[in-house]
Image: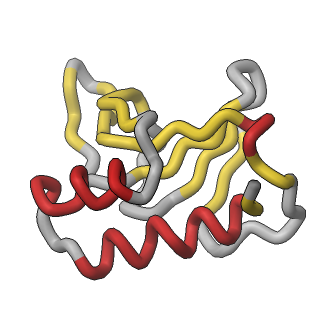
Amino acid sequence: MKTISEIQIEIGEIINTNKTWDERLPELIKAGYTGVTYTWTRAGGIGRVFYLKRKHIYRIQVAQTELQAKFPIAWCVEIPAHLVIHDTRLTDGSDVF
């Protein structure tokens, strides 16, 4: 198990080394992040972490936000909270919902 900060740094490295979505997806899957979904997100940026309290998941945005029917949607990695060691120090750009 890893802390959310370690996961955010690891995903951030994948994002920085792979500039296009087509290059990022295989690298994310190879790193073990299989919960990649095209889903609702807050108006954030690539690499932003969101914690969804009701669903008990961390959502890390890995692609640009697009508007669909007036709602921001993006490709995100979803990580169940029970698989993460809770860390009180999230890096910049984290939100709790």
Eyeballing the image, is 31 above or below 15?
above
Query: Residue 21 vs residue 17: left or right?
Result: left
Of 79 and 27, nearer the camera is 27
**Which quadrant of the figure contains the C terminus?**
top right
Q: Position of residue 42 (x, y in %)?
A: 48, 41
Q: Position of residue 25 (x, y in %)?
A: 24, 51
Query: Residue 1 vs residue 17: left or right?
Result: right
Please name the residue shown 79% across and 35% down the image: 82
Query: Residue 39 vs residue 58: left or right?
Result: left
Please name the residue shown 37% across and 37% down the image: 36
Eyeballing the image, is 52 above or below 1?
above
Eyeballing the image, is 86 above or below 77?
below
Please name the residue shown 51% across and 59% down the image: 48
Query: Residue 65 vs residue 81: left or right?
Result: left
Q: Position of residue 93 (x, y in %)?
A: 59, 66
Eyeballing the image, is 51 above or below 60?
above
Image quadrant in which you'd find residue 38: top left
